[in-house]
Amino acid sequence: MKTSIDRILTTHVGSLARPPELVSLLEAQRQGRVDPEGFDEACRQAVQKVVEQQATAGISIISDGEQSKPSFSTYVRERWSGFGEDQLPMPLTLDEREFPNWGYRNRKLAPCIGPVTWKDFSAVEKDITNLSDAASAVTHEEVFMTSVSPGTVANFFPNQYYKSRTEYLETLAGTLSREYKAITDAGFLLQVDCPDLALRNFWFPDLSIEEFRRVIAENVEVMNSALSGIPPSQVRMHVCWGAGETPKNHDVPLRSIVDILLKADVGALSVVGANGQHEHEWRVWEEVDLPDGMVLIPGVIDNTTNIIEHPDWVAERIIRYAKVLGRTRIIAGVDCGFGTGSSAKPAVDPAIAMAKLRALSDGAKRATQELW
């Protein structure tokens, strides 16, 4: 994993908006009525375009924008067996209880009703080929590819088959380990998406913080087993409190979970740092030491607003982290993805999202001028 040795490197969280024609194909794929060859070609073209856009915006560490996936988490439904139909209601979040007009009240979850196994690993291989080909045509520092965490799959696909949550998590970890290894064997950085490690308000609203800590401690332990054999320097972990513009009035403080997050066998930790509920948490790092060899990827761009951050303000955010942790232990990032699900209209207009990435790049250059 490259670090900011002589300048501040930039990256993002992974998901970027898909073109409308690909969104239609992803829905057709979900319904089992898509032409495979046409879908594959649309994915290839979308990845090529989104990689070019990142390079043009000046992003150092790029991805495929999750173009082939209907969402960062539920993509496994198209690639694995073992899941049923959408029928289970999501928990009523603490924010929804306080603010009834905000939330996900109509969303249903598909349960796990049978053995979880791969049914289409070729989809992973196609993603790797598309990203490799597209990245070879642009200037960049490194390439990353996202993959879901075992705990997140367990949240989105509640267990109705395995004897215990632990058995279910271990099965998910064993299944995901093949994907993790394929990504790193291809020479990419692996980003494990772990909103499960912060979303108490979303998934476990009735648990105390201490009870939630026990849940996520097991999630981290199981994820580490899935990463066995992969050098931490090839892995980064993204943790967030949800990608959407919701009140976030009941988010677990970073300070309450950071010790558990730092037990992950990863070389970089991506955390929220730009939205109004979490921007102050840069101060956590005045009291908490990053493990040796780990870097921080703080969000210095907010993915929930169409306001384009001024590069000077982006630079200021970067500099405060650098003054606490050191300039070589910071990579400038985004709070969360700009296109975490293909079925919903992006919260940020896709053209504005690219402008925000340019602001990220420009802000990193200004921070570099002050830090070096």
Image (cartoon, rainbow, N blue to C red):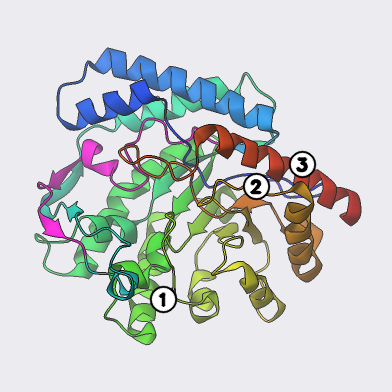
- Relative to 141, is 135 on the left or the right? left
Q: Which residue bears the numbered disc 3?
A: 362
Of labels 1 and 2, earlier in sequence is: 2
- Relative to 77, is 14 on the left or the right? right
**Residue 282 point in image, percent of width and height:** 66, 70
**Residue 279 point in image, percent of width and height:** 62, 67
Q: Is residue 69 magenta?
A: yes
Q: Which residues are magenta?
A: 63-90
Residue 250: give its label: 1
In this view, the mark in front (2 or 3): 3
In this view, the mark in front (1 or 2): 1
Label 1, label 3: how many angstroms apart (C-alpha)?
A: 33 Å
- Relative to 153, is 326 on the left or the right? right
Amino acid residing under circle 1? His
Amino acid residing under circle 2? Met
Q: Is residue 9 above or below residue 126?
A: below
| Residue depicted at x 37% and y 63% | 196
